[in-house]
Amino acid sequence: MRPVSRTTTPADLAPHELRVLVAVDRERGFSAAAQALGLTQSAVSHSIRGTERKVGAVLFERGRKGATPTPAGTAAAAHARRVLRLLDTLVAEARGAARGDGGVEGSAAEGTLRIAAFRSAALHLLPAALERLAVSHPGLRPEVRVVRELGAGTAGEVVEGRADVGIATLGGTSPVPAGLIGHVLLEEPYSLVHPAGHPDPRSLPLVDWHENCGSYTREWWRRQDWIPSATVLTEDDGAVLSMVSSGHGMAIMPALSLTGAPDTVEITDLGRERPTRSVGYVTTPELAFSVAVRALIRELRAACA
């Protein structure tokens, strides 16, 4: 790894330098980043070299296949996205406050609100909240990305600066990931789902999907000697419900995934010891008090009430 000379006094990074950094990280190449930004490749290269000197670390490994971020580059790009988002928020909220009589508190949110949500939350929890948000804040433009709750999941999108709010499954001893703030919106119970009218549903093979059975339910699953290993493993809960509806097995599913379940399936309560899944929101400390994020959180709470 080539050395980078360190400045004795850290120099401020300008917004345009942050945008170039984010573009190279996203495009994985100087030429592609230059094209996306409407700059020359030499301008992009010069900007990255300057940023590396200011930071005092190599941010990208250059090679024939493009630019690969180093660990320092990955961390820097995440912070850059979050800083740029704060600059966008500054402009949007200042304009909103200038138009209103009540200051920022009484102003309507405007601009883009980036939301990451797992599939069942995007289908059954967000629509009602976004409908109410459109009435109270017509200048706000929500952008929703459906993210699988595997690995870093929706919370990881917030940490990396790709989303302002994540609708996430929260569990374990630390329900909110480190560095973020948030709260539980609802506790959804798991139920046994099987073909309607089946005389012995627990004898059926198990249909499951990759995102199911997180750390909050594993202990319960281990105690259930009647639950076999999955015979069918699908990509999402919609496919599971379709397989069960067609008579191909039974499943253990959370309540959001069962919203609008067809009449061809039967939902059986698992009793007092049934597992539950905590669903909540996460955001960054710096965006938590923005008008747009607070407005969305209010509507999400109302939708879950």
Image: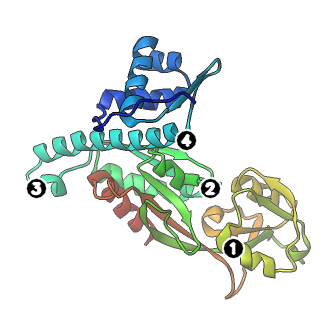
Read off the residue under disc 1: 217
Read off the residue under disc 2: 149
Q: Splitting the image into 4 quarters, where does residue 121 fall?
A: bottom right
Q: Report the mark closest to the observer, 4 or 1.
A: 4
What secondary structure is found at the residue carrying circle 2?
loop
Question: Eyeballing the image, is 216 above or below 120?
Answer: below
Looking at the picture, how far across and down is residue 205, in whole percent?
90, 66
Read off the residue under disc 3: 102
Q: Residues within 10 Å of mark 4 (few under 14, many from 20)?
A: few
Q: Residues within 10 Å of mark 3 (few under 14, many from 20)?
A: few
Q: Report the mark closest to the observer, 3 or 2.
A: 2
Identify the amino acid type marked 2: Glu
N-terminal of the pair, mark 1 or mark 2, is 2
Residue appearing at x 40%, y 18% in the figure: 46
Looking at the picture, how far across and down is residue 123, in whole percent?
56, 54
Residue closest to the eye, 199 or 285: 285
Residue 71 circle label: 4
